[in-house]
Amino acid sequence: MPTYTGISSEAFRHPLDRQAEQALRNLPGFDLIARKFVEFVYERPQLVYLMGNTIQVGPRQYSTIYQMFRECVRDLDIYPEPTLFVSQDPQANSYALGQENPYIVINTGILDLLDEAEIRVVLAHELGHIKCGHTILIQMAMWAMSAASALGELTFGIGNFLSQGLIYAFFEWRRKAELSSDRAALLVMDDLNPVMSSMMKISGGSIKYSHECSLQEFIRQSESYQALDEDGLNQVYKFLMYSGVQGTMLSHPFAVERLHYLRQWAVSEEYQQIRRGNYQRSPASGSVNVAAKTNENEAEALRRQIEELQQEIERMKRSQ
């Protein structure tokens, strides 16, 4: 499998991902909160929880998975190596978070459902999030949703950041970010089929009846889904489903849509150039593309804001 020494995430990042992230970062004051708030409030407690309640993958724990993981880290030229955890959860799911100490969590549902090539796809996909620096905004999106739910109509000076419009923008960006990570998986695999089959199985695969699932039929389903756009009303329905008007907002595009975008890129000249070694490189080989650090004055100001927010929450709890 190919190794992309020194590759920058900008070499494979989907343009819709770039556009959606720029829209978020253009919000006044958002960049500071996105880069620092989650570091103080979310990342460390989550790491403590994972260390206490999951299995940390290594040379003597899930050694086969660890070897595949290290190869994916090498192929995408990511440094330092993130931490990998396996969580006992039958849901076929995985995620990547963390800024100072990036980490990936993969559920046992993934390990049980997918074959080794498809597990490699999942690992490469999550590493793509880390390579692209997505994890900060993913954490910020998670915080925004939980904060909006906990605070309700309360503002504490941050109400402007928790508007319905911002939450919608978060979800729109998260969906587009998946397209970049799908590209990272294809680069690592250098084979479209296991990437597509992993999407199919996670969508509705069965361990017992996997032999009755056809990748070609799933591809045809993807083409039929795209054809729905010929009816303008169907486009409206798609928008309503993604935006949560008819239920919960979706953090991922539909699998058939992801498959459509990836198949397009797989035959593009851009992809072929990367495979030949003609790609944009990072300023430093092996660097993880994360946001630049905030200066100490900004960090200290944010710490004070967090303390004030926590004090106000406690005060209101006592007054109830």
Image (cartoon, helix red, strand yellow):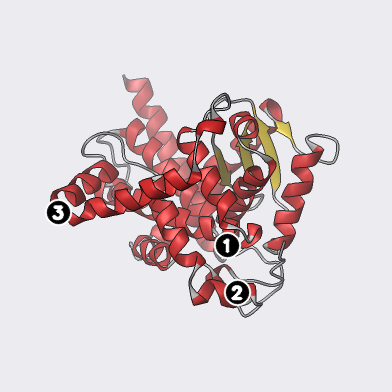
**Which residue is label 1 attached to?**
290
- Quadrant in the picture for residue 40: top right
Kind of element beneath mark 2: helix
Given residues 11 and 155, the one toward you in this image is 11
Q: CA distance from mark 1 to mark 2?
A: 22 Å
Q: CA distance from mark 2 to mark 3?
A: 36 Å
Quadrant in which the C terminus appears: top left
**Which residue is label 2 attached to?**
274
Q: Is residue 23 above or below residue 218?
A: below
Using residue 40 as the reference point, say whether residue 80 is left or right of it. Answer: right
Marker disc for residue 232? 3
Given residues 297 and 49, the one toward you in this image is 49
Quadrant in which the N terminus appears: bottom right
Q: CA distance from mark 3 to mark 1?
A: 39 Å
Q: Residues within 10 Å of mark 3 (few under 14, many from 20)?
A: few
Using residue 100 as the reference point, say whether residue 249 is left or right of it. Answer: left
**Horizontal and vertical percent position of residue 147:** 38, 37
Q: Is residue 79 in view?
A: no
Q: Are marks 1 and 2 in contact (CB under 8 Å)?
A: no
Q: Are marks 2 and 3 in contact (CB under 8 Å)?
A: no
Q: Is residue 231 above or below residue 56?
A: below
Given residues 235 and 53, the one toward you in this image is 235
Q: Amino acid at mark 1?
A: Val
Using residue 228 as the reference point, say whether residue 44 is left or right of it. Answer: right
